Amino acid sequence: MIPRVHKRGSNTFGLLNYLYGKGTHEEHVDPHLVAAWDSFAQDPGRDPQATKRHLQQLLDQPVQALAESRRPAKHVWHLSVRAAPDDPVLSDEQWGEIARRMVAATGIAPAADEAGCRWAAVRHADDHIHIIATLVREDGRRPRLNNDAKRSQAEARLIEAEYGLKQLSTGDGTAAQRPTSAERHKAHRQGRERTAREELRESVRRSVTGARSEEEFFDRLAAAGLLIRKREAPSGDLLGYKVALPDDRNKNGEPVFYPGARLAPDLSLPRIRERWSADSDKTGSPDFPGSASSNSPSAARRRTATAAWVAIGVVEDGDDAVAAAYIAATGEVLDALAKTSAAHTRSELRDAANAFERASRSHIRAVRGHDRALRQAARDLVHGGPALGRGEDGASTAMVIDMLFFLVTAAAHWHARKGHAQQAEAASRAAEHLRNAYRPAAAQPLGVLHQRGRRLSQPVLQRQTTLLRETLPSLAEKIVAEPGWYALAATIAEADAAGHDPAALLSDVVESRELGTADSVSDVLVWRLRRRADLPADATGIPKNRTVKNPAKVRPATARATTSGRRFGEEAPGHTR
């Protein structure tokens, strides 16, 4: 259940006229009273003798009774209460009871207070009501409305539990504005899956991903086909911007423009500029291995995997402001990956990016600049172009999805520790979409590695099993029993042939607290080893008859402590792949 306190107004009749009208797009159906301060109040919606003007006069009586100098300038209070999309349709009686609880909880008309404000609850759709009240009590005093929005949220949580409705999380004011009923009805009439606001939010978000200047940002908006209107000061300085879809028009045939800040708090021009200013600040960013001079899709994905690996530790153990910056930049990486993904992963990656958008903001203000490596990775993905979905491109995509899954899961844990319920839930949903995208991305490259591993000689497989038991004693038996064990064995053989110490590599890559409960530990280790040893993500180009260099040369290694204080293989809460 979603309550929303609207801006206060001064025109009681104007709001009643809207509530009892047809709506901006005739979406209001059968508007009628479900409750009011007076149980005998006449309903202009269903009583032919009642009028909106009479209801307005009754609501405004306590205001008009005051001397003009004592009347509040903004005396109209407005609260909408909307059910969640999956909730059952409530009856008028149930909505009436919800309205009474809301005016009591917010201080408009406290329970058993006969001198409370006058109010009325109007229902003109199945899924929500509007409550209008005038802000002068019957005794002439003003109501106490401190924290009325928070109190309405708290009451909504109680109502959800008592009515068996979907349990939502209380917001913190950092969420993007939800589409209005009118916007949803308009999208439905036009045959759109999403509202114009939602389409614009995604387009602007993708346009800013990895951008380094206003010019590049606005060029991308134009390339996306959006109409752009800039707001300039008399001096010519740019103050803000608005965007519109070319085919989204109002009743006068004019484009409907949305300011960036109305799409999402971090899409206002000042907030976007923070990213660009941070790009020019050379302090505070960790070294980022890899050169952007080689920017094929696969090279960009490998660099992104490395940046994500570094970011996991920062989110788990870093300063809050720095972790918030990395989490915000993770959203850019997801947007860039979705934009450049192959068809068989595009839908799930797009859903992951859209879900994580809510997790990218909180009241912990990000200190930008520290996130430069991830923002550069997002830029590389965009400029590297679309991946083909096969060969090295496909394998490197599976690798980066694997790394991003653990980074997004770390973000979910971070938000949960901070009490950010909505953000934690959004990050968890994004992780599930990444899990779903990983399966088709990894099937072909892991299949090749699996076949290569099965062709290894029995002595080599035995030595690698011994290596695993010495290096990862708590999970060795589980790994050997997994279908992915042969792909891991092939990867260990390649790393050994390339001159690496397999035991040292295995110890080095076991640093994620999520690994102990992963669906396939062997899969995770394959991608981490290939990234750490700089092996090709795609094994199809490796000669089948290449021999292992010094296969017996291994050293025992103990499990290393994870960045969160746990050792590899211990039980850890949270979502895993």
Image (cartoon, grey):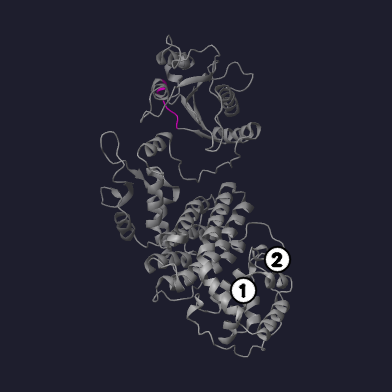
**Above or below, comparing residue 45 to residue 345 in the picture:** above
Amino acid found under the numbered disc labelled 1: Val
Q: CA distance from mark 2 to mark 1?
A: 14 Å
Q: Position of residue 290 (x, y in %)?
A: 46, 76
Q: Which mark is residue 463?
A: none
Q: Give 194 or 201, whichever is nearer the viewer.
A: 194
Task: Give me the residue at 59% from left, 60% from top.
Answer: 410
Task: State whether the magenta stretch is mostly helix, strand or loop.
Answer: loop
Mark 2 or 1, closer to the camera = 1
Amino acid found under the numbered disc labelled 2: Arg
Label 2 secondary element: loop
Label 1 secondary element: helix
Magenta span contains residue 10 = yes
Task: Give me the residue at 32% from left, 47% from top.
Answer: 243
Say left or right for 97 vs 188: right
Task: Give me the residue at 55% from left, 54% from top.
Answer: 427
Task: Give me the residue at 45% from left, 42% from top.
Answer: 177
Query: In the image, which residues are magenta?
Result: 7-12
- Counting other residues with Cα less than 10 Å from the Cα at mark 2, is it few (<14), some (14-19), or many (20 or more)? some
Q: Residue furthest top?
A: 49
Q: Which mark is residue 509?
A: 1
- Counting other residues with Cα less than 10 Å from the Cα at mark 1, is it few (<14), some (14-19), or many (20 or more)? some
Q: Position of residue 343 (x, y in %)?
A: 42, 60
Lower sequence index among marks 2 and 1: 1
Q: Which residue is mark 2?
A: 566
Magenta span contains residue 514 = no
Q: Position of residue 56 (x, y in %)?
A: 43, 16
